Amino acid sequence: MSITRVGIIGSGIMGSGIAEVAAASGHEVVLRSRSLESAESMKAGLAKSLDRQVEKGRRSAEDAAEVLGRVSTTTELSALADCDLVIESVVEDLGVKTALFEELDGIVNADAIIATNTSTLPVVEMAMATGRADKVCGIHFFNPAPAMSLVEIVRPLTASDETMAAAIAFAETCGKEPVEVSDQAGFIVNALLFPYLNNAIRLFDGGVATKEGIDAAMKGGCGFPMGPFALLDLVGLDTSLAILDALYEEFRDPNYAAVPLLRRMVAAGTLGRKTKVGFYDYRK
Ligand SMILES: NC(=O)c1ccc[n+]([C@@H]2O[C@H](COP(=O)([O-])OP(=O)(O)OC[C@H]3O[C@@H](n4cnc5c(N)ncnc54)[C@H](O)[C@@H]3O)[C@@H](O)[C@H]2O)c1
């Protein structure tokens, strides 16, 4: 099946990035947010990002206007009815996601694919909340979506080969490098990345080094483009905690047991870049 019209649910960090990627690669995009204000602010952010690309000579002004023209915003799930593919990118909470899949199943065309951008949650549970479990898979973009080339295509036990092939083809059309992975918490990247991020918090909390020192060490010593605390702030501490909790729930491995400091920072509302304070302060 060919995918031309893409619905995206959630206008947070990832929903916005995925909307940009899909529109820039020629797809019609319908972005659904619960509030029109956040959908419109996402579109304003996209306009700004496109302007910067024009200034840097990466895109013509006409091309930028066409990309922006392909994105429409809505607060209504019913506006996604005629999409070929819907990707949800709302909060990392299984209850919220399964309820959304159940509702979408009654709205979206029967032959459309419904995908999740979850980082760790069981895709099969979202699939089973619908009457089209064969047409549900994970399409997991990385942050920031316009810049990161990897997309994990997650195969739950229920997905058909046609669905997987269409999801892989969609990621390729977006200019990404898809990697297929089975539906196990954390897939590839987060299963390997999050014990490292969690243990970095443990080192800091234990007074072994400052967060600046740990970040500098992992950049200078391992050649990583950013250190663990800068990355945690980019991902969002609430999302990071939800990922660790889902990994721990699945494997009971102590490396996945969130360090208490992370849970306390989330309780305090210091979530990283999105709230302007996390391990670092972005208010200046
Ligand atoms: N942040 C990352 O680095 C990253 C990377 C890859 C995938 N993801 C995944 O993408 C998804 C979204 O993460 P994000 O980083 O964009 O989060 P975010 O906090 O930036 O955005 C979350 C979005 O969900 C919406 N939302 C919150 N509660 C909701 C509810 N009850 N019903 C409907 N919508 C609700 C919010 O309004 C917001 O639009 C999660 O599944 C996350 O695991 C995140």
Image: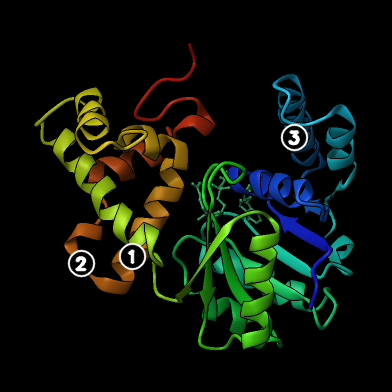
Mark with earlier residue (3, 1): 3
Calculate the distance from the C-alpha at mark 2 to the C-alpha at mark 3. Answer: 40 Å
From the image, tell me which residue sits under label 3: 46
Q: Nearer the viewer, residue 32 or 16?
A: 16
Q: Nearer the viewer, mark 3 or mark 1?
A: 3
Give the mark count.
3
Where, by quadrant of the figure, is residue 100 drawn?
bottom right
Q: Is residue 31 above or below residue 158?
A: above
Q: Is mark 2 within 8 Å of ligand 1?
A: no
Q: Which mark is residue 253?
A: 2
Image spot of residue 66 (x, y percent): 89, 40
Q: Nearer the viewer, residue 97 or 208?
A: 208
Mark with earlier residue (2, 1): 1
Residue contact between numbered discs 3 and 1, judged by CB atoms under 8 Å = no
Calculate the distance from the C-alpha at mark 3 to the C-alpha at mark 1. Answer: 33 Å
- Residue at (39, 64) in percent of width and height: 186
User: Amino acid type of disc 1?
Assistant: Leu
The answer to whether residue 7 is left or right of residue 206 is: right
Q: Is residue 92 visible?
A: yes
Q: Is residue 257 above or below residue 67?
A: below
Mark with earlier residue (2, 3): 3
Image spot of residue 19 (x, y percent): 72, 48
Image spot of residue 139 (x, y percent): 59, 65
From the image, tell me which residue sits under label 1: 247
User: Amino acid type of disc 2?
Assistant: Asp
